[in-house]
Amino acid sequence: MGYLRQQYPSHKWECIHGVEHMPVGVSDQEGRLRPAPESFLSEELISEISHRGVDKSRRDLLRGSFAAALAGASGLTFADDPNIVNVPEWSRSLGKPVATNPYGQPSPFEANIIRRQSPGLTQTDQASVAFTPLQNLFGCITPSGLHFERHHQGWVDIDPQRHRLMINGLVKEPLVFTVADLLRMPSVSRMHFLECGANTALEWGNSAVPTVQYTHGMLSGSEWTGVPLSLLLERAGYDRDARYLLAEGADGSGMTRTINLTGALEDAIVAYGQNGEMLRPEQGYPLRLVVPGVQGVSWVKWLRRLEVGNKPYATKDEASHYVDLMPSGQLRQYTAIQEAKSVITAPSAGQKLLNQGYYCITGLAWSGRGSVRKVDISVDGGRNWQEARLEGALSSKMLTRFNFDWVWRGEPALLQSRVHDDTGYIQPQRAALVAERGTRSIYHNNAIQTWRVSPSGEVDNVQVG
Amino acid sequence: MFRWARLSIVCLTFLGGNALAQDYLSALNELGRTATAAELSAWDIDVRPDFLGLPPGSGSVAQGEALWLDQCASCHGDFGDSNEVFSPIVLGNITEDDVRTGRVAALTDPSVVRTTFMKVATLSTIWDYINRAMPWNAPKSLAADEVYSLVAYLLNLAYIVDDDFVLSDENMEDVQALMPNRNGMTEDHGLWSVNGVPDVVGSACITNCSVDTTITSFLPDYAMNAHGNLRDQMRHYGPLPGVQTAPTPQQSVSQPAQSDSLDQIPADLLAVSGCQACHQVNKALVGPGFTAIRARYAGADASVYLAKKIRQGGQGVWGSVPMPAMNQLDDTVVEALALWLASGK
């Protein structure tokens, strides 16, 4: 690590994924890394030596290997990289014209990085979910096209000129707004995470799915732009004694949820913008209620109506679903807040460490009650912890990216992350959460996640304790 | 945080005086307008547990049964017990004792499938949801009396009311007091408010923590490929490629997307028509897959016949599950779908 520290003494450097300068082994993929002695011996030779000892011929082979490796390490000889010596075709041809893709697309080489369904999870494709590929994303903003989808009766394309927002209930004057009205009003832009209350639901009982996309991929971070809810409710003259707000969607399901009005007046937004553009249809175009820190189902999409009330509404998705079954047989109703949670997104299950050497353990942390204060990393299943670096500004109720330097020498490891939020809350181990809530509550699983690294470098999803 | 007062202060900075701020506030009040009575009536359809919002009307168990078989049974089963398309609504796991105590005992039994009537404490919920969201492919198409009759039928299936029962706005409250899990909900938790008290907090231990690191669960080898080849779900280059889980190495998908052999599927039409609630492309769900339909009518001049089947529904051609009439679809949509289904070679 000394090399890195010298190069970047400020200790503010990002995790470096291109590891040309690192003392690691030969890449088995790209032929671009400097050979290093410890991994320059063929597996065949190592096996022969360990079984039969070192005889004359094997000694000569060994000597030759080290000589070649040392030559490499001293910088005297490198294999010519054909990608350099044969100047690539893209450097020798005319590029494509502007506006070839009027709405830009990712590189075709990124085609693996897409939303995916979990086979067999739902019986229909309309009341279903497609998960965000967290394992290959950077930073804290989720590209809008990769934002997870969770619909209850399919998604719809709404004509914004025909869409209306109604505000009624305990208000002096029931109101109707056009989208144009809302676009004209004072706006705010805020960064917030959005997590489905059922994120990680599959993992309550046992390790069930193979990658972080499926364990934690009902999670996103975006910049949301729109009109503060409080501004609209003040305009309608809401009853100051009211404690509840019903939000209703314009889709077929007419999604309805009871919102805690006291909390929503602080920071909820009637949003039309996401990451600089209008909301995507799958995210509620043209209007969505943003309720920071609260589970995604309450961020009602295709928002058509807000009703101020003095009692909760017990809608289908807070009376039959999104109720948390406790071991007593009681169902916790009106569970809303997403408590602090973190997960390592890379290395994570389904990935394979290319070879030994430096790795950046990276991931996301968030809290529905405030901001992230600290993230700890364990590589031994929770026995010992070290603090990770937090990247960027720490926004309230927003994803925080963490990074941690790790040198892997082929030993088995159990990777975990643990977040502390600014209320003093600490993310619990799975065993502690299950001891209180059992394994059948479906929702609000914010337990510490464990990834197992095998000596082969393969990473898989396991549970400990 | 976003109170008018704050906004006023912000604006004063820009506008430089109280008079101008007043102008700004009153100008803002010109945006939006009063909702009319007819508008409120059209959209304010929610029904609360105290039955605020419940429209007058009534419906019998018998009426509900007929409507159920016609419009609901294809997804939920004749007795609301199907697990094919949606989770069961009733399964007979509710006892007389549950109805007496208002707590469904079977909720503590992990072997029992949780049904709607085992969980829901409020009858208003069921009325409201059917009214706003059912049937699956034609939400908000039921009249109030039809909703009453369907709720009556479900209550009868759950053994809460007798065969000759008539549910109405007059007796909803009485029946709600019989809901088997009416006392099964709790709001005694910390997850309603941002200031709520957590039930479980993790340990702050840093070194030599007392934890059990025994592996208690992992995915068996045979399950590793259940979500497809993980190698093709990760970036191929870089330090952490995906694990090859498919039995034989597959060609990289990190290539420009290849054209789908089924790219003639009229995805837009299928999206607006709601056909895919019951039909998938390559396999039977509630109804036959589109591939099977196209194969059956390949080469035949069947578009007129198929358009009629889409409009009128039917039963018996592909099995006993009836297809409801799709008479809410535009003629252009029906005809385009029929032409596509009849265009198999």
Image (cartoon, coloured by chain):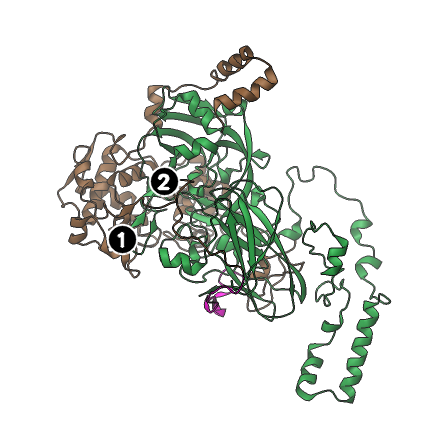
Chain colours: A green, B brown
> Which quadrant of the view contains residue A25?
bottom right
Under tag 1, what secondary structure? loop
Q: Is residue B71 visible?
A: yes
Residue at the outermost top position: B19
Q: Residue furthest right?
A: A76
Say if the magenta span includes residue B208.
yes
Residue A131 visible, this angle: no
- Choose top left, top right, bottom left or bottom right for residue B71: top left
| Residue B305 x %, y % | 39, 44
The residue that disc 2 covers is B326
Q: Residue at x 70, y 67 (%)?
A: A28
Q: Is residue A249 left or right of residue A103?
A: left
Front residue (pair B171, B213): B213
Chain bearing mark 2? B
Does dot 2 land on a helix, a strand or a loop?
loop
Amino acid carrying mark 2 in the image: Met
In this rendering, the answer to whether A150 lies above or below A21 is above
- Residue A49, magenta (yes or no): no
Labels 2 and 1: the sequence-earlier one: 1
Residue at image position (51%, 44%) is A422
Please name the predominant secondary structure of the magenta segment in the image.
loop
Find disc 1 in the rendering and name its residue.
Answer: B81
As drawn, A222 above or below B298: above
Residue A337, numbered label: none
Q: Nearer the viewer, residue A261 or A124?
A: A261
Report the magenta residues as a range.
Answer: B207-228
Task: For the residues labelled 2 and 1, say whether their Cβ atoms are less than 8 Å apart.
Answer: no
Q: Of the residues tagged 2 and 1, which is closer to the observer? A: 1
Q: Chain of mark 1?
A: B
Please identify the quadrant where the N terminus of chain A is shown. bottom right
Q: Nearer the viewer, residue B218 or B150?
A: B218
